[in-house]
Amino acid sequence: MMAGAVHPILSVCPSRALSTEKFRVLVENLPPGLSVTLHSLHCSEMKDYWEAFGHYVADNKGTVDVSQEASLGGTYTGKEPMGLLWSMIPVPGSKEHAILFKLYVETPQEVLISVFQGHLSEGFRQKPPLASVVAERWFMAPGLKTIRVREKEIEGILYIPPGPGPFPGVLDVSGFGGDVTAYRPAMLAAQGFVAFGVNYSLPGRKFTVDYFLRAFEFLQEHPLVISNRVGLIGMSLGAIVVLNMACRTEAISPRCCVSINGSHLLMEESVDKLLNNVFQMKEHTIRRNEQNHVTMRGMQLPIPNEATINMENINCPLLLVVGEDDLNFPSAECAELMAKRMHTAGKEHLLTILSYPGAGHVLHLPNSNLIRISRWRFSFFDQKETILWGGHPKPHAFAEEDSWDKILAFLKQHLYPGPQSVPDAAL
Amino acid sequence: MALQGPMLWLSVHPCRGLVDEKIKVLVHHAAPVQRLTVHTLFRSEDGDDWEAFGHYVSDSAGAVDVSEDVCLGGTYSGHEPMGLLWSLRPVPGSRPSLRFRKKDTGTPMLVTISLHQGFLSDSFTERLPLASRVVERWYMAPGVRRVELTEGGVTGTLFLPPGPGQFPAVLDLPGGGRSLPEARAVLLASHGFVTLALNYLNPRRTAGGEYHVGNDYFQTAFSVLQTHPQVIRERIAIVGLSFGASMALGLSVYSPTIKPSCLVSISGSHVQPAGGSLGDIFAEFKKNEKNTRYDEEKRVIWHDLLLPIPSNPSKKVDVGQLCCPLLLIVGKDDQNWPAEESASDMKEMMEMSGNGHLLTVLSYPDTGHLIEPPYSPHCRSSNFINAESREKFVVLWGGEVTAHCHAQEDSWWKILDFLKKHLYYGPQSDITSCT
């Protein structure tokens, strides 16, 4: 063996985990005091390469424990056990505005984690690492069933946990132009809910509030779902949809509702009409910077009453999650306005607001990287634009982790209550 | 349907893990002080169903924590966090004398964990559980590669950890059986060692027409590892079970080319013609066949075939000449080999020779011959086919379930620590007394 050869023991534990879970990256058997770089590499479904890295120094036992020690530089700094995931950036030479997004939830995300000698910030491809391991990040739990639904014009995907059931249900309305974004409903099913990701992106069809109300009923009536334990969750456009649903208490009785960066805008006819209304409200306030990146958060506030939902009708606990650096929508201001409306109606006890400084519009699951900017085609623009969604990596990562924990606790409290839970104000 | 009142919640964490990782099974919101049965079910690749179960009573908050609470009965009892896995046994009505083995180590075991009302002991599949979860138990960590090896006449399965290397390596000599057991080798690779599970026991004819492979076969295997580009040639260990352990002892002392950094011998013996071969060990057994005993169920006990431990030095490996650290793992209820008696004799020999400081003996009460990776079901007896004669027996391996499974867990982590110490942490931790 050559003198000075370093044979560290690199481990990531657990090596297979749900994407929302933490791992511990540990390096042992290093020469004490050695400068090293911990590096992660991932090839996305869109064939882009993403990486993150942190600089560390081995302690006097020759160990680096990413969960315990501070990164001294890199794509993240400070004590960040999951920084190697959430701070991922496109590798040099990548196409502009690539985004990291898991479309197919049946397969895991594979991340190669390596340790390099020295404090490197580039050239990872050219230099062999001291050691590498692979971490698998899963979006589906074992035993989960997925069923494509096409029933009475309702379309979507049902994610069903293992076991005899019946289970509480969650209707999940995604925010990105309507097709089912699978990762959240799949992860909710891993936590023991029947989750229905409803699809509203089919061409040539008009999607009204009634469509979503029928989707809710479909879920309630499913033999594996407990009919009086069904909740709502939505993000962005999907959040506006679920808030519209929540106040239609003459039609449905959701047990609880989660809105992520949404607002109380009224969806009069259809989703498309809503988007056009939104555009009209924002038209004068859309800003473009020197690179022609679009910030759309400006809007005439408060929203005129006739353009809002009857929040006073809401009878169920409501959780509003807000990214304060949302550059696409005035989520924080709308949350405040919604709070005022609930207060006026004597229903503030139903409301919880989680507001995160430095977090942007796209609040995904924990350990996801920040989508601060991307190419997007809104129906009211003639072409694809470069949209700024906002957020800064570290606070946004904190918001994703903290809000997910609180969303789960909220859903469990209201959909899986224990004997000593606070009784619902509704029903 | 609508439901009022609290809802039961069953969770198992992690839902995916390596087979040596612990799981945590939790129940919430059951009725207070409710009798419950936690049941595990696994269907093997051969289509046999294996199950285990434990009886618990929820606390005043309606909670059960299998890692913390006491199991009141079932296939295991007492405070046993992993009892639901290691006490798996074939369901009633199964084919007799089955031995647990995962053949395809690249895919996980799928285990269904269910919660039932009341204390049940049978007919689980006829009742609807209160809740179920599925967990995956993997032998292979992500990124580990499996390569079927044929080189220089040697066959086996090579497992490579992810990464560029170089890595220390392990030559894994499993025990007997119809197909090559890979479980230990793939787990070792999952912990950072290039591991070669050597196929040395299946009947074959060598060029010379011999029935068993000669010592050169093992020497070639060792050299294949040494010359592998991802292996640190000075850091190779040998881990052997049963026949493999005995071969490892003999080769480490007498082979001019096999010089392991350290040696793990599980349920082995040094009793064999000194400097002999695998065929010689088989011949020793055959010579003493008359010492075969049978238990009350006519299961074969081969424990006495190498006894008494000879005092004639030509009849056993001179372990006093061993130059590397040796870890002996012994089940005191081994009904198949005289592992305990051999270990005592080896200890004496090494102490007399002055290399006793190289020896560590782990001796486990009520533990049998088949000391497998942790949380594997215990096998007290099973069908066995004699490699030479192809005769079928039911062989008694020994061991009592709980003690044996504790021994599997304890010894595994000690094996890993031992290998890491001598293969990763470097020669400064070795005490070599000879060159």
Image (cartoon, coloured by chain):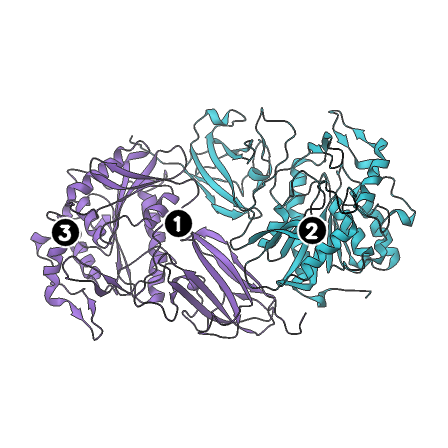
Chain colours: A purple, B cyan
Q: Amino acid under label 2?
A: Val
Relative placement, left or right, of A74 versus B250 is: left
Check the image and report above or below for A424 versus A339.
Answer: above
Q: Which mark is residue B154?
A: 2
Residue assigned mark 3: A272
Front of the two marks 2 and 1: 2
Q: Are marks 3 and 2 in contact (CB under 8 Å)?
A: no
Q: How many marks?
A: 3
Could you tell me the amino acid type at mark 3? Asp
Q: Could you tell me which chain the residue with mark 2 belongs to?
A: B
Q: Is residue A311 left or right of residue A61?
A: left
The answer for how far apart the CA atoms under marks 1 and 3 are is 30 Å
Q: Position of residue A265 (x, y in %)?
A: 14, 53
Asked if marks 2 and 1 touch (Cβ < 8 Å), the reply is no
Q: Is residue A191 visible?
A: no
Considering the numbered disc 3 on the image, is that residue within a helix, a strand or a loop?
Answer: helix
What residue sits 50% from the left and 59% below the top? A24
Q: Kindly identify which chain the residue marked by label 3 belongs to.
A: A
Residue A139 numbered tag: 1
Image quarter where the C terminus of chain A lies is top left
Taking the view exactly as shown, the residue that stands out farthest to the right is B312
